[in-house]
Image (cartoon, rainbow, N blue to C red):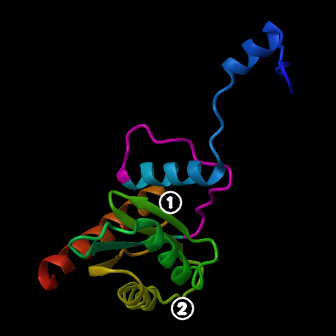
Amino acid sequence: LGDKLPLLVMGPEWASTRLLEPPSIPAPQRMSAFLRSVLRGDEEMLQAPDEFKLADPARVLVVTAHPDELAPLPIKKLEELVAAETIVGDPQVQIVSIDGMVAAILREFEDNMDSEGMGRAIIHRARSALLLSAITVGIGRAYPGLDGLRRSYREALWSATATELLWG
């Protein structure tokens, strides 16, 4: 380049149209934000992404984990572990981290889906692969629609909380 610097010159019409465009959010982040707002019961729920379809009943599986005293909670690794165990039962599973927990939204498209077996497998793999002092899985019942999804999440959260209180 020597003593010359590259320069990009744009007209004012390009700048004004670029400033008015809303920032684009990648599809996985948009889906996660939408599901978080549904599960939390936000009043101003985000618009459902185009790829979101909930025709079949869905259940929520919640995983809470407590790392050893000095180790931070490996939430991303826990998400990957939950995804790996639940994708066998539901290839369209949605994994969302919410309030320090991991939630898996499982569509109930098969009558023989073994969500309890998935929970046991998650506990077994997490204990052997991650430095966690305690891990709890709660499973909600399957309900149709967004209100049903929210209800299933509350049931799964209650189940995980009750388990922690009773058995630590």
Q: Is residue 150 above or below residue 87?
A: above
Amino acid type at circle 2 is Asn
Q: Where's residue 105, x and y in %? A: 49, 68
Please tell me in which quadrant of the rendered image residue 65 appears. bottom left
Please tell me in which quadrant of the rendered image residue 166 appears. bottom left
The C terminus is located in which quarter? bottom left
- Magenta segment: does it hold 55? yes
- 28 relative position to 132: left or right: right
SS for dot 1: helix
Q: Distance between the residues labelled 2 and 1?
A: 21 Å
Q: Earlier in the sequence, mark 2 or mark 1?
A: 2
The N terminus is located in which quarter? top right
Q: Where's residue 159, x and y in %? A: 26, 75
- 20 relative position to 102: left or right: right
Q: In this view, does 46 lie above or below 50?
A: above
SS for dot 2: loop
Task: Name the residue tied to disc 1.
Answer: 145
Residue toward you, 156 or 77 = 77
Residues in magenta, as a range: 40-56
- Residue at image x 64%, y 77%? 91
Q: Where's residue 63, x and y in %? A: 36, 74
Please tell me in which quadrant of the rendered image residue 148 appears. bottom left
Task: Name the residue tied to disc 2.
Answer: 112
Residue situated furthest top in the rendering: 12
Question: Can the viewer see residue 3 in this picture?
Answer: yes
The mark found on residue 37 in the picture is: none
Question: Can the viewer see residue 59 in this picture?
Answer: no
Amino acid type at circle 1 is Gly
- Magenta segment: does it hold 137? no
- Residue at image x 33%, y 67%? 73
Q: Where's residue 38, x and y in %? A: 44, 52
Q: Say few, some or many: other residues with alpha carbon within 10 Å of mark 2 (under 14 / 14 to 19 / 20 or more).
A: few
